[in-house]
Amino acid sequence: MVNATVIEALFSHLTFFFALVARPSPSRKLFFLPIFCANIWLLLCVPLPEGSTKTARFRGYGLAFRIATASDFILLTDVQNDLRLQNDNRRIPSASLGARMLWVVRLLTAHRGVGWTYEPTARLPRRSENLSRWAFVVYKISWAVYYYILSDLLQVLLQWNLAVVKGESYGTETVGWLLARTTFIAYLVEINVSLNLPYNVVAAVSVFLGLTEAREWPALFGYWSDGYTVGRFWGRVWHQNLRRIVTVHSKFILKNIFSLTSGTSLAWHVQLYAAFAISGLVHLAGDYIALGDWTTGGSMRFFVLQAMAITFEDIVINLASRIGFGRTTRLSKFVGYMWVLGWFIWSVPGWTRPWAIVSLGQVDVHQSVILRICQKVLRLENWLF
C-alpha cells in the first residue's frame, strides 16, 4: 500500500512550499493540482487509526484548510507581489532563493496573518506589548496550565452530555430539555480549550527560545464580553483562524460569480453566506472523517444557520436604530447576551450531537482525572457517575 505519510509530505507539504517559493508566473497555478489531489485522497481514501472523534475531526479540518489555503495562495493570490510583512519593503520576486524560502516559512507560520499587511488587526485581541520576554513566558505557561486543568474538568460536562445522549433525563420536562441542550455547548468550550492549550505552549516555547517576540502572539480568542450578538461572537470572540480563507474566497464568489461590487447590502449578505458556507465545507470534512459519511454531521446546516441569525440581527438592529434605539447600552447588551446564549442552546446540538453519539462507542474518551482523584480521596466512588 502507498505510504500516506510520504504522499502527504511530497505532494502536499513540499509541493505547497515550493509553489510559494517559485517566482510569479502563470504556470505556478499548476502546483495546485497535485496538492488538491493528494489531500482529497488523504481525506477520502486513507482510514485513520482507531482514536477519538475529536482527533478525527481535527484531521479533517486540517486537510480541508490546507486545500483552501493552497487555493488562496496559489490560485487567487499572487503572494510574492500582493502579500508583505509589515515594515518590509523588499521586492520578494527578485530576492534570492534562500531569502524567498525564509519568507515562505514566515508566511506559512503566520498565525492569522499576524505581522503581515493583511493582518485583521481590528478583529484580534490586544497584544502583550508591555510584558518582558520572561514575563510573557510565565504568563503563557500559566494560561497553558489553566487550560490543561479546564480541559480535564470539562470532561465532567462531556460525561454528562453522553448521559443525555444515552437518553437519561434530568428534572422536569422543560428544565430537563434545557439542561440537555445546554450540555452540547461543552463541545464549543472543548474546541476553545483544544486550540488554546497548544497555542499558549508554542507561544511560550517560541518566545523563550528567541524565535519570535511576545507581540507576535495575541490571544487566540477574543473577550467573551464582546459577544452580545451572533455576528460579534463569530467576528470578535471566536478564533479567526479561518478568516483569511473565507474572506478571500467569498470575495472571489462575490465578484466573479455574482458580478457584484462591495459596499451594498446585497453584496454584504452574499459575502456573509458564502463565508459561512465555506466554513461549513471545511468543518464538513471533519464530519466525514469522524462520522464516516457526508450526511450524518450537521456542520453545513449549523454554519448556514449562523449566517441566517446574523441576517436576522441585522434587520432587528436596523429597525431599532430607525425608532431611536441605535445606541448600545447595558440593557441592550444584556438582551444581546441572552439572545446569543439562547441561540447557541438551540443551534449547537444539531452540530455537536452526532459527535457525541459516535463517542458513546469509544472507551475512556471522556474521563476526568481530577474527578476520579476526588472520588477516591473522598470515598465517593458512586458520586455523579
Image (tube, grey):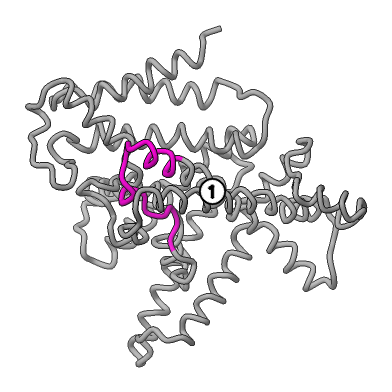
- Mark 1, residue position: 144
The structure residue drawn at horizontal position 79% and vertical position 56%, both measured from the top left corner, is: 164
The quarter of the picture where residue 362 lies is: top right
Q: Is residue 355 magenta?
A: no
Q: Magenta part of the protein: which range?
A: 202-222
Q: Which residue lies furthest to the bottom in this view?
A: 324
Residue 367 at x, y = what percent?
76, 44
Residue 159 at x, y = what percent?
77, 51
Residue 286 at x, y = what percent?
55, 38
Residue 126 at x, y = what percent?
34, 61
Residue 149 versus residue 191: which sits nearer the camera?
Answer: 149
Q: Is residue 73 left or right of residue 379?
A: left
Q: Is residue 73 left or right of residue 161?
A: left
Q: In this view, does 365 lie to the left or right of 288?
A: right
Q: Is residue 78 left or right of residue 253?
A: left
The structure residue drawn at horizontal position 39% and vertical position 56%, both measured from the top left corner, is: 273
Q: Image height check: is 294 above or below 274?
A: above
Three-letter amino acid code of the residue under disc 1? Ala
**How busy is the neighbourhood of tag 1: few (under 14 within 10 Å), some, or many (20 plus)?**
many
Q: Image height check: is 14 above or below 78?
A: above
The structure residue drawn at horizontal position 38% and vertical position 89%, both measured from the top left corner, is: 325
The structure residue drawn at horizontal position 67% and vertical position 57%, both measured from the top left corner, is: 184
The quarter of the picture where residue 121 lies is: bottom left
Q: Image height check: is 318 above or below 118?
A: below
> Which quadrant does the N terminus fall into?
top right
Residue 272 versus residue 241: which sits nearer the camera?
Answer: 241
Mark 1 residue element: helix
| Number of marks present in the image shown | 1
